[in-house]
C-alpha cells in the first residue's frame, strides 16, 4: 500500500515537472540583470537550427527563461507588506536609458503658492454647494443662483455711516467689478512673472504707466493662457492683430510610412534624371487646333482676294514678286 502511494506521488511530481518548468535556468554566459529598469541583457549566442525549425516556440522559451532570471533576482530584494500585498523595494537603475524628450521644467510658483508653501498652508478642496441660512437650502457657492447673486437681493439695508441717497445696488455691482478686476490683475501678474524668465526684455509686470506695445503684449499673452490657447476668446472692436501669429510648421514623421517616403524619393530622382519638360497633352492639342484655324483663315482670305480683282490691276513689280511665293501678298 505504501509502495503504491509513493508511486502515485512520483507520478504526480513527474506530471507537474512536465507541465511546469523549473525556476533554475542555466546559461553559458551569465546574463546582466538590472532590477531598477526591470531589464535583462542576454549575450548568449542563438542556436540558428532551433530558431529556424520553430521560430515562435524558440522565442517564447527564450523569453520565459530570461523572465524567470529577472524574477529570481527580484525575490532576492528586501520585501515588505503593504495592505496584505507583498512589495519589493526596487533599487536605483544601473543602465541609463535615453529619453525621447527633455525633462520638463518645473512651473514657476505664483505669489500665493509661495506664501502658502512658506506658511505651511495646505490646499483644501471646498464643496461646490453651501447652505443658505435664509432659504434653508443648499445653493451654489458662486455663479447663477448662488448665495451672493446680485439678482437675488431685492432689498438692501443702508448702513448708518453711508449716504442715504447712495444707490446700494450700484455700489454692490461696483464692488464686484473691482474684485473681478483685481483677480484678473493678479492673473496677469502671474503670467508676466512666468513669461519674464522665458522672454527677456518684455516688461509685462503691470505698472502705473505702460506703453501700447507692453499692453498689447500682455493682452495677447493673457488670451493664450487659456486651455484652448485663445482660439475661442472673443475679439475686441479695436483689437490689434498680433504680427507673429503664424501657424506652426508641420513636419512629416522621421520613421514609419516607408511607402510615402519611397514614392517621394522616386519622384525626385525621375525629375533629376530625365531633365525633360513634361508634355501637356491638352495644351498641345489646343495649339494644333489654333494652327489649323490660322491656315484655314489664310486660305479663306486668299479666295476672297481672288474674287475681288485680278492680278492685271496690280503693278508689275508686285506680280513678279508673287510668282515665287504666293503667300507673300494678301
Image: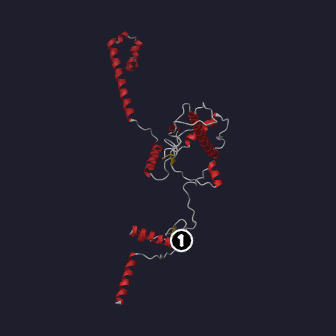
Expressed as whole percent of the image width and height from the top left, the position of residue 193 reads: 64, 45
- As drawn, the residue found furthest toward the front would be 160
- Quarter where residue 64 is shown: bottom left
**As rendered, which of 171 and 153 lies closer to the eye?**
153
Q: Name the residue: 65% across, 34% down.
A: 211
Kindly state the secondary structure of the residue where label 1 is placed.
strand
* Position of the C terminus by quadrant: top left
**As rendered, which of 9 and 117 lies closer to the eye?**
117
Expressed as whole percent of the image width and height from the top left, the position of residue 272 reads: 48, 44
Q: Which residue is mark 1?
A: 80
**Can you see residue 326?**
yes
**Can you see residue 240?**
no
Expressed as whole percent of the image width and height from the top left, the position of residue 15 reads: 37, 79
* Position of the N terminus by quadrant: bottom left
Q: Name the residue: 42% across, 13% down.
A: 317
The local crowd at label 1, few if under 14, some if 14 to 19, many if 20 or more residues have their Cα within 10 Å, is few
Expressed as whole percent of the image width and height from the top left, the position of residue 3 reads: 36, 89
Q: How many marks?
A: 1
Q: Name the residue: 38% across, 11% down.
A: 314
Q: Name the residue: 46% across, 46% down.
A: 269
Type of colouring: secondary structure
Is 316 above or below relative to 238?
A: above
Is 299 above or below relative to 210?
A: above
- As drawn, the residue found furthest toward the right would be 208
Amino acid at each position: 500500500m505504501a509502495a503504491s502511494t509513493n508511486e502515485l506521488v512520483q507520478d504526480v511530481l513527474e506530471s507537474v515537472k512536465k507541465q511546469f518548468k523549473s525556476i533554475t535556468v542555466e546559461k553559458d554566459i551569465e546574463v546582466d540583470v538590472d532590477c531598477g529598469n526591470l531589464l535583462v541583457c542576454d549575450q548568449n549566442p542563438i542556436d540558428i537550427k532551433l530558431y529556424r525549425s520553430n521560430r515562435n516556440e524558440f522565442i517564447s522559451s527564450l523569453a520565459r527563461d530570461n523572465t524567470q532570471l529577472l524574477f529570481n533576482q527580484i525575490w532576492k530584494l528586501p520585501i515588505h507588506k503593504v495592505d496584505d500585498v507583498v512589495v519589493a523595494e526596487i533599487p536605483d537603475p544601473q543602465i541609463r536609458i535615453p529619453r525621447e524628450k527633455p525633462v520638463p521644467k518645473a512651473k514657476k510658483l505664483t505669489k500665493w503658492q509661495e506664501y502658502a508653501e512658506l506658511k505651511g498652508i495646505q490646499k483644501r478642496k471646498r464643496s461646490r454647494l453651501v447652505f443658505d441660512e435664509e432659504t434653508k437650502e443648499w445653493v451654489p457657492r458662486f455663479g447663477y443662483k448662488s448665495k451672493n447673486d446680485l439678482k437675488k437681493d431685492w432689498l438692501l439695508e443702508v448702513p448708518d455711516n453711508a449716504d442715504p441717497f447712495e444707490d446700494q445696488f450700484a455700489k454692490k455691482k461696483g464692488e464686484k467689478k473691482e474684485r473681478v478686476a483685481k483677480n484678473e490683475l493678479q492673473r496677469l501678474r502671474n503670467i508676466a512673472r512666468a513669461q519674464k524668465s522665458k522672454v527677456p526684455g518684455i516688461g509685462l509686470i503691470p505698472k502705473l504707466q505702460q506703453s501700447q506695445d507692453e499692453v498689447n503684449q500682455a493682452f495677447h499673452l493673457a488670451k493664450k493662457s487659456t486651455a484652448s490657447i485663445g482660439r475661442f476668446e472673443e475679439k475686441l472692436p479695436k483689437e490689434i492683430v498680433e504680427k507673429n501669429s503664424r501657424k506652426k510648421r508641420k513636419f512629416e514623421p522621421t520613421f514609419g510610412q516607408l511607402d510615402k517616403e519611397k514614392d517621394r524619393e522616386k519622384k525626385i530622382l525621375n525629375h533629376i534624371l530625365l531633365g525633360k519638360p513634361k508634355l501637356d497633352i491638352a495644351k498641345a492639342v489646343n495649339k494644333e487646333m489654333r494652327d489649323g484655324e490660322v491656315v484655314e483663315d489664310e486660305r479663306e482670305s486668299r479666295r476672297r482676294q481672288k474674287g475681288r480683282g485680278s492680278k492685271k490691276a496690280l503693278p508689275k513689280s508686285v506680280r513678279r514678286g508673287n510668282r515665287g511665293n504666293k503667300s507673300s501678298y494678301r
